[in-house]
Amino acid sequence: MDSWEFGTTVRKWRDRVSPDTAGVRVGARRRASGLRREELAELAGISVDYLTRLEQGRSTSPSVQVVEALARALRLSDSERDLLFRLAGHTAPGSGVVSMRIPASVQRLLDRLAGNPVAVYDATWTLIVANAPYDALMGPTSSWRGIERNSLWRNLIGPGTRAVHTREEQAEFEAALVGDLRLTVARYPADQRLQRLVADLSAQSPRFVELWNSDGVADHQDHGRRKVIDHPGVGRVTVDCDTLIVAGDDLRIMIYTAAPETIDAERLALAIVLGTQTLVD
């Protein structure tokens, strides 16, 4: 099917998604009932210019990852998701590859956690989606592209995060991430995207190569459950970071909370207010 039909379909489905449903904060003077183009682009983690070209049929080869991101942002049903993949010239990913899909049941869970910082990762520790409170606490994620969205790259090669670690804690955290990725490779030996990730990390990080070639396995003692976040607006905030594993879909949901009636709870609330106000402005 031609690319124009893909773009028309995306535009039609964009118009039917309300901002409230998608978790988009809007001002009082809004006229559009559906998502604006820039809002869908941000939710899907792609540029507005690229989404414009897709909708207008000037870009005709969206990747599997882009189609999956659009399907997720548009909150498509399983049959609609399959149609979008067909319109893009792809077959919807099967069980032999790492899924980036957030099923409807998990999305309902995320909706109920909307007041807390929450991020969802796939089995490669690549960020699928983060909500506004997460961005307010940890820094904006919507501009991240490609490998920038992967936690191993960010911690081993990239700029890191706002989490504060001692040298020993950082080493343990890196080893746990690499060990978990090794298990993921064993589960999905035919996944080409996963193979490219391992190759890219190996080419860019001697530390990754060292850990990858070691005899270590994933450490499930959860060293990172209690985190100290160095927030630029409110200072250091100590939070609990609980990771929920969605077994059937191999997703990792990270939820940040602070003990009630503590200074950390006050700082977390303030960080969220400051950050989400900035996002709306």
Image (spheres, rainbow, N blue to C red):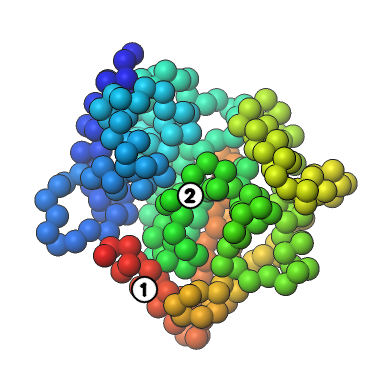
Q: Is residue 210 above or below residue 51?
A: below
Residue 7 visible? The answer is no
- Give the image location of residue 101, x and y in percent: 48, 38
The residue depicted at 64 percent of the width and 28 percent of the height is 191
Disc 2/disc 1 C-alpha distance (Å): 21 Å
Examine the image and state in which quarter residue 198 appears. Answer: top right
Q: Judge the density around disc 1: few (<14), some (14-19), many (≥20) Cα neighbours within 10 Å.
A: some
- Give the image location of residue 133, x and y in percent: 41, 64
Looking at marks 2 and 1 on the same chain, the residue that comes earlier in the sequence is marked by 2
Q: Is residue 168 above or below residue 174?
A: below
The residue depicted at 48 percent of the width and 49 percent of the height is 144
Q: Is residue 126 left or right of residue 179?
A: left
Q: Nearest the camera: 247 or 230?
A: 230
Q: Which residue is mark 2?
A: 144
Q: Judge the density around disc 2: few (<14), some (14-19), many (≥20) Cα neighbours within 10 Å.
A: few
Q: Which residue is mark 1?
A: 274
Q: Is residue 233 above or below residue 139?
A: below
SS for dot 1: helix
Residue 137 visible? The answer is yes
Q: Nearest the camera: 259 or 210?
A: 210
- Give the image location of residue 37, x and y in percent: 26, 42
SS for dot 2: loop
Examine the image and state in which quarter residue 122 appears. Answer: top right
Residue 7, which numbered label? none
Of marks 2 and 1, the one in the foreground: 2
Which amino acid does the dot numbered 2 rest on?
Trp
The residue depicted at 50 percent of the width and 65 percent of the height is 138
Q: Is residue 59 left or right of residue 191?
A: left
